[in-house]
Each structure stands twice: as structure tokens, then as C-alpha cells.
Amino acid sequence: MSTERVKDFIETLVGNPEKKISLHKQFNSPFQFFSSDDIEMLHAMMYNTKCSGSGGSGWDTVDKGESKFSDRTQAKTCQDCKTKMIFYHEDVCSECGSTNLKYPKDSRWGISSESHLKYFDELAGYRVALLEPETYSSDCRKFRLRSWFIETKNEYLTTYMKYQFDSPKSNHVNFMPLQRDFYRSSPCLHLDAWISLDGNHEIVYYDVENKTPEVVPEKYAKFTTEEIMRKKNFGKNRGITSRN
Ligand SMILES: [Zn+2]
């Protein structure tokens, strides 16, 4: 499958969103140029399959893959009056005029530990996509879209799912991109693209056969899986804070 096809696909999805951005800015309504459905469709194209035809039930794609999307063009918050403004809003608070605004960088992929364990033998793996702005500022018009593949039977991921499932807390795992759980789950990069809202998109890397996981940064390489799990707060030791 060619790089050109991915580029065309992105071009079609993104289009020319400036008019939309301006409308969303006017009403402070969240704007994302990719929806989760768009990313499922992108994955369907990348992995030569189709989507399920309806949201909310069954597999994300016919080949029993699970698509996840995390978008870092999140709303920012005024640190002085707590007003929330969409990513593209000017970097001045609309209510109090403060320039002390905070862009969060904490969007995650939600994974159900129950589904992971229940469909362990069927699930064709996780396709996890992350969209990040080049700069955290309202005039940013260039974004990096990456997508990785994580095997269902990855040992670290499965251990994490078991711990979460057995915990008194919810079965839901909030999986943080680019941190310890991510790197320890052996994600293999399948797509790396730069998206420019002026239409100049660039596919930097595209290989859905890549089986070489991302190198684990040194700070995340310490400790065994069990040691990491024991340190996590799964609701058993309420007084202990766990940070990934
Ligand atoms: Zn304010």
C-alpha cells in the first residue's frame, strides 16, 4: 500500500478547515479535524479491512482490531479564572484577559481490561493513534499524527489488564501515550505523518509490517513488570500515590 494513498486519505479528511476553525472559535466549541471514526477508517485503510458500519458495538474494524485515538489539541484553561477555551482560541483569556493559560497534555487511550481478557484470543491487536500539535499555541497549524501497533498478547499490557480487572476500581484502563506503560508494551510504529492545515501533508514513515518496537527510554526501563504493577494504585492502597 502506497504512501500516496495515505496522503490522499489525510487530505480528504482534513480538507481546508480554516472556516470551520473560525466558526468553532466564535462559539468556543471543540474542534477536531479527526474524529475517532475517522481514525478507525484510517486504520481500516492501513490494515486493508473495513469498519463495522455502526459505532458503539462489536469490533472497530472487521478484522477484529481495536482502534484508539488520543488528540492533544485539547481545551486550555485560564489559570486565573479557570475559563476553558478551545485549542485554537487566541492565547488570551476571553473572560479576564489573562495570558496565563495552560494547555493540558494528558489525553489518553481508553482500554477495557474486561474486553481485553474476554477477547484475548480473537482481538487482532491495538492500533493506537496520537495527534499532537507542533507547538502549543493557538496559531499552530501543523500537527504530528502517529499510529502504533500493540499486540494483544503483549506480556506487559496483559499483566496490566489483569491487575486492573482484579482491582476494586473500574475495569477501564486510561492508557497514557509516550509514557512508561506505553513504551513497556512494545508499540511498533506504523505511521508517522505531519499534517499541515495549508494542505502540505508529509508522510514521514509508513510500514504496517514493522515489528521493531520503540526503544524504551532509560527512565522507563527500570523495574520488572510486577514491580511496576505493585506500585500502581489499583484502589487497594488509597494513601499511596501512583504516577506513571
Ligand atoms: Zn481568565
Image: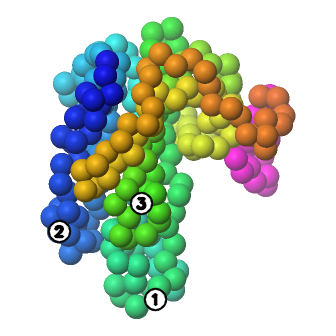
Task: Locate residue 54 relative to residue 58 in the image: left or right.
Answer: left
Left or right relative to 68: residue 51: left
Give the residue type that dot 2 points to. Answer: Leu
SS at badge 2: helix
As helix, strand or loop, the secondary structure at mark 1 comes to loop
Q: Nearer the viewer, residue 77 or 170?
A: 77
Q: CA distance from mark 2 to mark 1?
A: 23 Å
| Residue 113 position by quadrant | top right
Q: Is residue 195 left or right of residue 148?
A: left
Amino acid type, callout 3: Gln
The circle drawn on residue 197 is none
Q: In this rendering, would 77 be left or right of 62? A: right
State the residue lying farthest toward the bottom.
96
Residue type beneath disc 1: Ser
**Residue placed under numbered mark 3 in the picture:** 74
Q: Nearer the viewer, residue 237 or 112?
A: 112
Residue at position x 47%, y 85% from top? 99
Q: Quadrant of residue 223?
A: top right
Residue drawn at x 38%, y 37% as measured from the top left = 203
Task: Work out whether mark 2 precedes mark 3 in sequence or the reverse, and give the earlier one.
Answer: 2
Residue 23's label in the rendered image is 2
Identify the magenta region. 226-244
- Residue named by callout 1: 98
Judge the density around disc 1: few (<14), some (14-19), many (≥20) Cα neighbours within 10 Å.
Answer: some
